[in-house]
Image: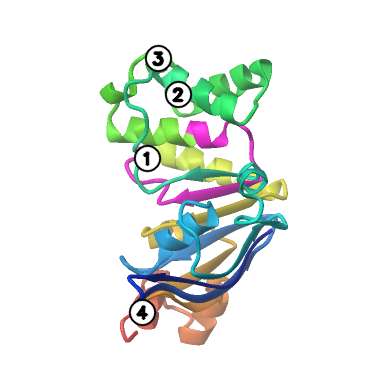
């Protein structure tokens, strides 16, 4: 389980990027985190993975406090940031082995996982090339592969489908569903509302750092209108905030 307890992040002493966020993501679900630009989505994920500390509040991953035991907490998840900025002078296979070393993945397991993911994402022939030669989409794929190489319980993905071709996006969505169905967690932010509507078990909508809604899309639709799309619901909730 991922748990936020009254989490607030203040920048420059006055700007609340996240304001009193309390949220739980349960095992076995794909949880979509939605909001307009500047809503606080990326700040929330960066606090969750230990990149930036909260000003106040507590964050736990599988019962482990990210501030009190950061190494143990970080072993529980794989994180894909919103921008695939990585070590571009490494070859793809070198980067994956580097990530495997960080997470203590045994060589035999590592090789099998790399081969499988490379086939799935059509990266086999590119692993020997330097990352600086990769397109944006290929860099996104190699970051995904590195984040998942240790088969973490929780996947924390910030706009994971940005730059992916349709086939890779489909494969990633299938992997997300399979991972959650095995009792694990997928927590991801997205601007693509159609994706969230199709694959998420629950969603949260955040705007100006405040949580506006948590629940499944159908319950929200029943409140705002049976024939209302997620996009229309999203606009109605956020436009007056």
* Distance in Å between CA atoms under marks 3 and 2: 15 Å
The label nearer to you, 4 versus 2, is: 2
From mark 1 to mark 2, how far is it between C-alphas?
24 Å
- The residue that label 1 is drawn on is 166
Q: Position of residue 6 (x, y in %)?
A: 57, 75
Q: Which mark is residue 43?
A: none
The mark found on residue 238 in the picture is 4
Whichever of labels 3 and 2 marks the residue nearer the N terminus, that label is 2
Label 2: element kind: helix
- Tell me what residue is drawn at x 40 percent, y 67 percent: 40
Mark positioned earlier in the residue sequence (1 or 2): 2
C-alpha span from label 4 to label 3: 44 Å
Q: Mark 4 or mark 1: which comes first in sequence?
A: 1
- Neighbor class of circle 1 (other Cα within 10 Å; few <14, some 14-19, many 20+) is few
For the residues labelled 3 and 1, the Cα–Cα distance comes to: 19 Å
Q: Which residues are magenta?
A: 145-166
């Amino acid at each position: 389980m991922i748990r936020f307890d009254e989490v607030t992040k203040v920048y420059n002493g006055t700007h609340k990027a996240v304001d009193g966020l309390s949220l739980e993501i349960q095992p076995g679900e794909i949880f979509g985190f939605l909001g307009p630009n500047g809503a606080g989505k990326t700040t929330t994920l960066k606090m969750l993975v230990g990149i930036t500390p909260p000003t106040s509040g507590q964050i736990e991953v599988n019962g482990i406090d990210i501030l009190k035991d950061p190494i143990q907490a970080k072993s529980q998840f794989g994180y894909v940031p919103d921008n695939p900025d990585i070590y571009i002078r490494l070859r793809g296979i070198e980067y994956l082995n580097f990530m495997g070393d960080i997470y203590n993945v045994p060589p035999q397991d590592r090789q099998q996982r790399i081969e499988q993911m490379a086939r799935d994402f059509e990266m086999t022939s590119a692993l020997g090339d330097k990352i600086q030669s990769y397109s944006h989409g290929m860099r996104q794929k190699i970051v995904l592969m590195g984040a998942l190489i240790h088969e973490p319980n929780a996947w924390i993905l910030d706009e994971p489908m940005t730059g992916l071709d349709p086939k890779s996006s489909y494969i990633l969505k299938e992997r997300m569903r399979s991972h959650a169905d095995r009792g694990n967690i997928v927590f991801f932010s997205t601007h693509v509302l159609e994706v969230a509507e199709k694959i998420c078990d629950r969603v949260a909508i955040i705007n100006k750092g405040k949580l506006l809604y948590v629940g499944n899309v159908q319950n929200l639709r029943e409140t705002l209108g049976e024939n209302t799309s997620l996009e229309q619901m999203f606009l109605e909730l956020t436009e007056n905030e």
